[in-house]
């Protein structure tokens, strides 16, 4: 009876280990950082955490790419921020990255800017750019959270209203 009980416990622990090994789909999302967008107009700040979409992950030499929704689906749920008419110390848009990411510093981050029809306009490293007043734009950035050989890459999108 004791042998059967021990064999059952060992088999159960083995089965649990196999299950955990193959069911690690969202374990790579537990310790990723946060991306927060802050819009300050005339000294009044509004901040929102952005939700990222997983586009790829890497563990050692194994890279997995995920199905990414089209930009129109991502943009439909994008957080909207108001861009001030004039960028200065009291009026600005800022994106803050909290956590460990593969890119060296926040200064190494780039944004793909799209118009309201989701047509690609250009790539920039700053949001202090001039936009046409009365229009909406979308900024998309990809962030690799983790280390160069072990990361998860998330895509973030937000809308800039002018």
Image (cartoon, helix red, strand yellow):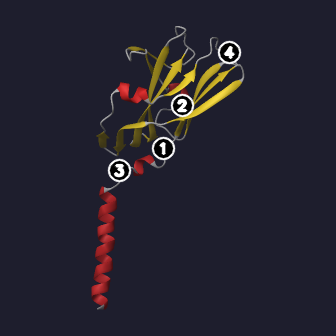
Q: Secondary structure at mark 1?
A: loop
**Dot 3: within a 10 Å radius of its alpha carbon, few (fewer than 14), some, or many (20 or more) residues?**
few
Q: Secondary structure at mark 4?
A: loop
* Real-space Cα separation, disc 1 to disc 3, in angstroms: 14 Å
**Residue 63: quadrant of the picture:** top left
**Residue pictured at 63% horizontal, 20% vertical:** 92
Q: Sequence-wise, which precedes: disc 2 or disc 1?
A: 1
* Real-space Cα separation, disc 4 to disc 1, in angstroms: 31 Å
**Dot 4: within a 10 Å radius of its alpha carbon, few (fewer than 14), some, or many (20 or more) residues?**
few
**Dot 2: within a 10 Å radius of its alpha carbon, few (fewer than 14), some, or many (20 or more) residues?**
few
Asked if the residues shown at circle 2 and circle 4 are in contact, with their CB atoms under 8 angstroms apart, the answer is no
* Real-space Cα separation, disc 2 to disc 4, in angstroms: 22 Å
Asked if the residues shown at circle 3 and circle 4 are in contact, with their CB atoms under 8 angstroms apart, the answer is no
| Placement of the C terminus among the 4 image quadrants | top right
* Real-space Cα separation, disc 3 to disc 4, in angstroms: 43 Å
Residue located beneath label 3 in the image: 25
Viewer-nearest of discs 2 and 4: 4
**Horizontally, is 14 left or right of 98 in the view?**
left
Residue located beneath label 2 in the image: 105
Q: Secondary structure at mark 2?
A: loop
Residue located beneath label 1 in the image: 32
Q: Sequence-wise, which precedes: disc 1 or disc 3?
A: 3
């Amino acid at each position: 009876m004791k042998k059967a009980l021990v064999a059952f416990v060992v088999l159960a622990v083995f089965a649990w280990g196999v299950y955990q090994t193959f069911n690690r789909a969202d374990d790579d999302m537990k310790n990723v950082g946060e991306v927060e967008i802050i819009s300050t107009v005339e000294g009044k700040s509004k901040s929102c955490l952005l939700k990222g979409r997983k586009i790829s992950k890497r563990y050692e030499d194994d890279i997995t790419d995920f199905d990414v929704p089209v930009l129109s689906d991502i943009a439909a749920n994008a957080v909207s921020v108001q861009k001030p008419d004039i960028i200065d110390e009291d009026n600005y848009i800022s994106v803050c990255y909290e956590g460990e990411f593969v890119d060296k510093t926040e200064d190494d981050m780039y944004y793909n800017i799209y118009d309201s029809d989701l047509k690609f306009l250009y790539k920039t490293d700053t949001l202090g750019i001039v936009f046409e007043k009365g229009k909406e734009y979308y900024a998309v950035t990809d962030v690799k959270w983790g280390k160069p050989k072990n990361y998860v890459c998330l895509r973030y999108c937000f809308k800039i209203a002018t």
